[in-house]
Each structure stands twice: as C-alpha cells, then as structure tokens.
Image: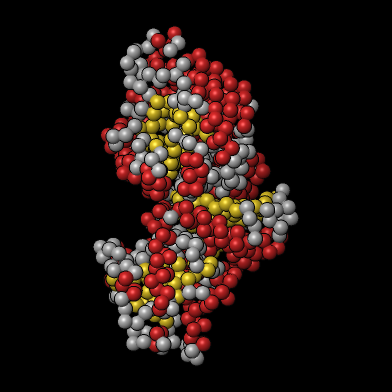
Amino acid sequence: MTYNDNRTAPGRLSVAVLGAGLIGIDLMAKVIRSDHLDLGLVAGRDEATSGLRQAARLGVPVSAGGIQSLVDVERPFDVVFDATSAASHAEHVEQLSPFGTMVIDLTPSRSGRMIFPTVNRADISAHRDLSMVSCGGQAAVPILHAITRAHEIDYIEVVTTAATLSIGRGTRMNLDEYVGTTQEAVRGFTGVADVKAILNISPARPPATFRVAMSLLGKDLTTDSLRSVVLGAAAEVRSFARGFEVKACSANDGKGFVAVEVTSSGDRIPRYAGNLDIINSAALLVAESYAADRLSMAGVVNS
Amino acid sequence: MTEATSQDVAGGKPIQIHDPSLRDGHHAVRHSLGADQLRAYALAADAAGVPVVEVGHGNGLGASSLQVGQARLSDTEMLSITREALTNSKLSVFMLPGWGTIEDLKNAIAHDVDLVRIGTHCTESSLAERHLGFLREQDVEAHAVLLMSHMADPGRLAEHCARLVEFGATGVGIMDSAGHYLPSDVTERITAMCAAVDVPVMFHGHNNLGMAVANSIAAADAGASILDACARGFGAGAGNTQLEVLVPVLERVGYRTGIDLYRLLDAADVAERELMPAPPKVDSISIVSGLAGVFSGFKTRVLDISAREGVDPRDVFFELGRRQAVAGQEDLIVDVALALRGAGTGDRS
C-alpha cells in the first residue's frame, strides 16, 4: 500500500503539491497542518521563485522539475494537488493516472469531476481527477445550489472581486477559463441554463476582501425565503472556511441579491485573500475525505 | 474639406478620432440602443469621415449583465448592423478581460471588426496579456487602454503601457473614466507614456468637471495621436469629450482630423435626435462623481439605489471613491448605500 511506505506514517496519505505560486504555497501550509496528509514534495519549474524558496525554508522537499519530479519517484504519491495552469492539467492527469494517484485540480481546467464539499462530497472517492472549479465557484455554488432547490430561478449572475495581490500570474492568464468553468459549475449544480460569471480585480488599499455578489431573477424570490436558505448554506460552508460571511441578502420585484465575503484565517496568507483560502480549504477537505475513505477501507484506525 | 477646416494649417499633425458613441453612449440610456439607432448614427459618422466607430454594450463585448445593465441587442446584432453601415470608417469593439472572453473576440473577428481595444484597470495591464496575444496571432489590430487612470501616477501608467506593447498592443492609451483630470494631469501622464512607448498613444476624456475638450487638447499637445470623442458627448455620467466640438477646436489649434465639419455637425444632430432623450450634461451628481474619482458609468445605479434606500447619492459617490471602487464593481453600491442608511439612522443591523 502506497500510503504505508517509509516516507509516510501509518494512517496518512502521501501528498505532493505541483505549482509553487500563491495557491500552491498556501496549500503547502495547510497540508503541513493536516493530521491525515504527509507533504512529500512541492514541485515548481524554477528554483529561483519565492514559492520554492519558502517551501525549502520550511524544510519541505522541493523540486524544480515540475510534473516529471512527481513521476520519477520510487513510490508514487497518493494525492497530487495541481496548482499550475488550466492548459497543463490534462497532461498532468495523463502522466499520473497509471499510478492511481488522486489528482485534485486547483486550476479552472474543467476536466475533472467538480466537487463542492458541502454539496457533493459523496462523489469524491469514485473519481481520480477532481476539479475545485474556481474560488468564485467554491463561494457561490453552495449558496446557489441551496437557493435553486427552494426557488424557480430563470437567470443567475456571479460577480467576483478579488484583491490584485491575491491573483497570481496563473489566474491572470486563465481569466477565460475562470469565467467558463465557473459558469458551467453554476449551470450544472443549479439546473439554470442562463448563467453569467464576471471577475473584477481590485487594486484598492487596504486590499479589498474577497467578495462574490450573486444576482438572481425568479418570480417567487422574497427576502425571507432567500435568507433562510442562504444562511443555512453559509453555515455549512463555514464548517471548513471559517471566514465565510453573508454581507447582503435581499429580494424585491423578482430580483434577488446575495453578497458573500470570505476572509482568510490561514497563517501564510493575508486576511483579504479569502479566494485562496476558500478553494484551498475545500481542496484540503476533499483530500482529507479521500484519506478517511481510503484508510477506513484499509482498516486503518484514524487517530 | 469644408471652408471651416480649409483655413487651418495645412500639413498639421494628424490626429485619429475614435468615436465610441455607440458603445459608451449605452451607459446613458441603460444599454437600450436598437437597430435603427445604431444604423442611423453609423451611417452619419461614416459620411462625415470619422475614422473609427466603436460599437457594443457600454462595458464592451460580453458585458450585458444585471451588474451593469442588460443590453437590448446582442453583440452579434450590434456588430452586424454597424458593420453593414460602415463603408469607410473602421469598426472597433472594446473588451474587458474578466467580462468578455476569447469566444467574444472570435465572434467580433467573424464580423470583420477592424480594431479591438482591450481594457483593464490602470494597474492591471497583465490581465490583457492573453487576449492581446490572441489578437496578435489572429493578425487583428489590437490596442490596449487603461481605465480609471487617475488612480495611478504617470510613471506607473508609462510602465503599464510599455508592458502592453510587449504583449502585442499596437496602440496604448488611458481613459479618464471618472472625469477627474485637469489638463496638467493629462499633460504629465501622456508625456510619460509617449516617452515609454513607440506606438500611438490615446486619450479618452470624460466631462464631469467641464474639462474634456481642454484635457483632450492637452493630450494632443503632449503627443497623443488618437483621441476619443462622442457625438453630443454621448456617454456615461456627464458625458465624454464632445466630438463636434473637439474636431474644429483641434483644427484651429493646427491638427488635422480629415473629418468634414458640416457632415460631422449633421451626425451630431442625428445623434441628439435619434440616440438620446437629452444630451448628457454636467449635472450636480456628475460633478460629485468626478470629484470623488468614481467611474461615471455608476451614475444610473447610484441614483436608483440611493432613491430606494433613502440616502444622498452624493454621499454614496464620495464613499465609493474612498473605497477606491473600480469600473465593474457596481455591486458595491448597495453595500455603501446600506451602510450610509445604517449610519444615518443609528441602526447598523
């Protein structure tokens, strides 16, 4: 069993993070704290980047060999977080699939099974390529899923605002994928066909807190009916993303408006960068769920 | 050339006029322009010899939304109608990455668009890298414009312009999206930009403080060779630089636009009659939005929401300015209005 090799303590899965940008480095910090995951490698493409240097300073094994450094290992990793770019993800999955590795995709590539932990956690173990969709998707879909189960909705719009300092080059080059993948996730999890996603980047100082504003059209929307489902769904999301907060929730004339903001509670990223925190916290929860499933199937007792 | 322009200095420096009336004007009429309106103005602008006519939703391709306003016509309809009406003028579109995508650009290219402008907030030029690269691969003329440019100093704007040229822009410029500039602000910025790049430099003025024409002349004098202007100033808030004023003023100063004055005045009359209930004016709320440094396009939403929540729209604009709202962040207006209402009544719940 791969999780029982000499690098990985019993009852834990071995993990690598591919990509050493803003997302990869925050993930690294979260995996290090996990009781069920052992971080074996952070792989980037350039030794001189601050991400790899930060990882090395923390004593984490690093490599500048990219995906090849995950393939050229004696024992393959149980879980790989892909924090590179949408265009590279398919190739990474192809290279890792012979090893049965669970690949959790932090890019908006749209290739794997989309997972929102409070909505379809049960789908995790049946797939080996899981998509975390996008930061805006992780904040919006749990709320929109709850709203559309209780209301007849004709149109949904999701406007995300993230602070410029929290948006790395990968995301900047993947805006189209962000928009397309977020829209597809909203369609898929709400059943509403007419969906629009928009992304704003704010350079305000002090930096703007990560925010997702959702506008909906639906004849039966009222402030009361909206509020009860939104607050319920938000409480569930808060179970893994503590800084998730509903800032506005109202409806009139068949038009609903919900705004949420997410602050980060992590130690390596600033409070405003809730976009990094929510997608990474969701990804971590997915890996831990997978670990729990794997270990319970193997009969290993979790401590 | 008509009499009015023939007396001007022959061989003066050419200025290319870029007319976004059919794009920016949408902000003034809740994105409601219809087919006949687009056709009527495009024909008139083409007849006047306006070199470039820009069309689309106020925030560009793919931007029809509840956030900013849903357009009456689709991008495809707007492109087809305008393309058909233009025989001499170039057809231009505008796109903000994060709002429109490469799919929208492909659609515009399929409609034989001549020029694409990619816009980003003034400090976020890297958001345009992918789309400028795509347009370069497609061999489509691509310019890049920095929005809300009063929020960055001249050196910073110049650096971003240089990067945009590296990404593939064959023209770069700034928009005074809030109508905040005075002529000396424009001179400083355009001078720095012209020193940083060897492609044409563009300026797009708003008239919130009555400075749009003066600012545009300052831009030309500092080296800008593309100026935006709209018929009757048709645009967000207090309106843009007024086209039919700017052109003869440029000619008097000694620049050449190649535009026929009488036909231009006719086009402006068509615009006033066909496109707008009334020409934009520097009203009280527009002065405040210019002073506050907030995107002029917020005006109709700020007025709607302030009336609904019972707060002073001037306070809303100043608070949005304090929060450094960028173009596209219309969802903040509700938060600001609710916060002000709470503060006003002592009830923050």
Residue at image coords 44%, 81%? A36
Color style of the picture: secondary structure
At x 61% / y 38%, what residue is drawn? Answer: B73
Residue B310, picture quadrant: top right
Looking at the image, residue A85 sits to the left or right of residue A262; the answer is: left
Name the residue: 52% across, 55% down. Answer: A180
Snapshot quadrant of residue B349 = bottom right
Q: Residue furthest left?
A: A48
Q: Is residue B47 above or below residue A13?
A: above
Residue B288 point in image, percent of width and height: 52, 34
Q: Position of residue B155 (x, y in %)?
A: 31, 40
Relative side of A111 to B144, left or right: right
Q: Which of B321 and B347 is in front in this view?
A: B321
Which residue is more in the foreground, A70 or A276?
Answer: A70
**Nearer-the-camera pick, A22 or B93:** B93
The residue at the point 59 percent across, 65 percent down is A142
Against B65, is B12 above or below? above
Can residue B286 be seen in the rendering of this structure? Answer: no
Residue B20 visible, this orientation? yes
**Can you give x and y, in whole percent of width and height, for residue B105 in the image?**
48, 44
Residue found at the very far right of the displayed protein: A220
Split into 4 quadrants, where in the image is the N terminus of chain B? top left
- Decide which of B5, A9 is in the foreground and name it: B5
Against B341, residue B111 (above or below) is: above
Q: How many marks?
A: 0
Image x and y of residue A62, in percent: 29, 72
Up/down of B15 relative to A42, above or below: above
